Image (cartoon, helix red, strand yellow):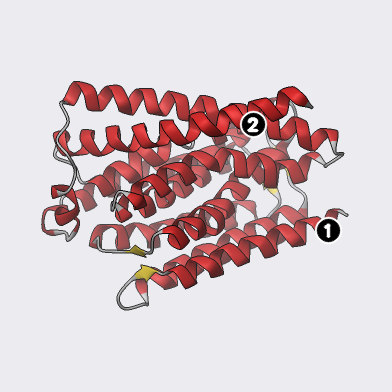
Amino acid sequence: MLYPIIALLIGFIVLVWSADRFVIGAAGTAKNAGMSPMLIGLTVVSFGTSAPEILVSIMAATTGAGDLAVGNALGSNIANIGLVLGITALIAPLPVRSKVLRQEIPLLLVITLLAGGVLYDLYLGQLDAIILCLSLAGCLYLFTRFQRNAESDELSEEEEEIPELPIGRAIFWLITGLILLAASSRLLVWGATEIALSLGVSDLVIGLTIVAIGTSLPELAASVASALKGHTDIALGNVVGSNIFNIAAVMAVPGLLAPIALDSVVFWRDYGMTLGLTLLLTALVLYQRPPKISRFEGGLLLAAYAGYLALLYNMNS
């Protein structure tokens, strides 16, 4: 038990530091490349910090733990909205200033609904996985199209606040931060998993809670660091992009490697929670004026996540 606890502490320290370096590198790269910080958050930052999820899914699929693989993808999306955005909004309210970002959130809802159609028959095969991968390619194309309209976006004011960094230094911190984020999150997941196993927690619950929370820690650290620096659109864009990637790529990996038969509870409980939180996020951003996630609403997201954990506990006790 001692080594897992040490791994947990070291992983947390490295995670916090590397997240700060990663945000600096991502913002600097965005400015040098003429891209908006929001687009960097939706692509490089969000997809990069999803590396732990995809590694876990590959390992789970190759060991026959299909429920854990899909549960990790859905659990990470639940944690990203309920835990990551909840905590981030409690620390610093998140006004949604970017019109482009308001286009990406409905896209996340569409991808989530597509996942529901794929999972409805409780079977994830290679054809289903290919459909999800094609949806990711479509998202990347739309990101590029939306970026063309970003010049007049209100996010340009946020871009002016990003400090100048030489391109070499920005890329160095971007890559170094990404590597350390992935490594430290893996260390955290290993430590937490070993502790959970020693306490007799089931594999499915580990995938939906410890592993999902652990693999969402890079998103949490990066989003909090971005919000504290005033880059609120990076903080939200990071979660939106990561959730799209989790559904369209992470969940597709086990289907590509081997067909998966799912337990019905994964659909109605875990996918249902994913869809519910995505609908709530869409409502907060599209139907609220001004669009924002306040501290109160962050508290609601966090409470919803706590309720989900309580449901998991009651069903597995």
Q: Is residue 55 visible?
A: no
* Left or right: 188 in relation to 107: right
**Quadrant hosting residue 67:** top right
Q: Tell me the residue that label 1 is attached to.
A: 315
Q: Is residue 47 visible?
A: yes
Point 61% across, 66% down: residue: 303
Q: If the image is split into quadrants, where does the N terminus sit?
A: top right
Q: Nearer the viewer, residue 15 or 283?
A: 15
Q: Considering the numbered disc 1 on the image, is that residue within a helix, a strand or a loop?
A: helix
**Up-down: is 305 above or below 148?**
below
Q: Give the number of marks.
A: 2
Q: Amino acid at mark 2?
A: Leu
Please tell me the numbered disc located at residue 33: none
Q: Position of residue 190 (x, y in %)?
A: 67, 28
**Quadrant hosting residue 91:** bottom left
Q: Tell me the residue that label 2 is attached to.
A: 8
Point 74% across, 41% down: residue: 206
Q: Nearer the viewer, residue 114 or 38?
A: 38
Q: Amino acid at mark 1?
A: Met
Q: Are marks 2 and 1 in contact (CB under 8 Å)?
A: no
The 10 Å Cα crowd at callout 2, few under 14, some 14 to 19, many 20 or more, is many
Q: Considering the numbered disc 2 on the image, is that residue within a helix, a strand or a loop?
A: helix
Q: Position of residue 218 (x, y in %)?
A: 48, 39
The 10 Å Cα crowd at callout 1, few under 14, some 14 to 19, many 20 or more, is few
Question: Disc 2 and disc 1: Cα gap in Å?
Answer: 27 Å
Q: Position of residue 255 (x, y in %)?
A: 62, 36
Point 71% across, 51% down: residue: 122
* Left or right: 253 in relation to 24: right
Mark 2 vs mark 1: in front: 2
**Up-down: is 158 above or below 58?**
below
Q: Position of residue 162 (x, y in %)?
A: 19, 43
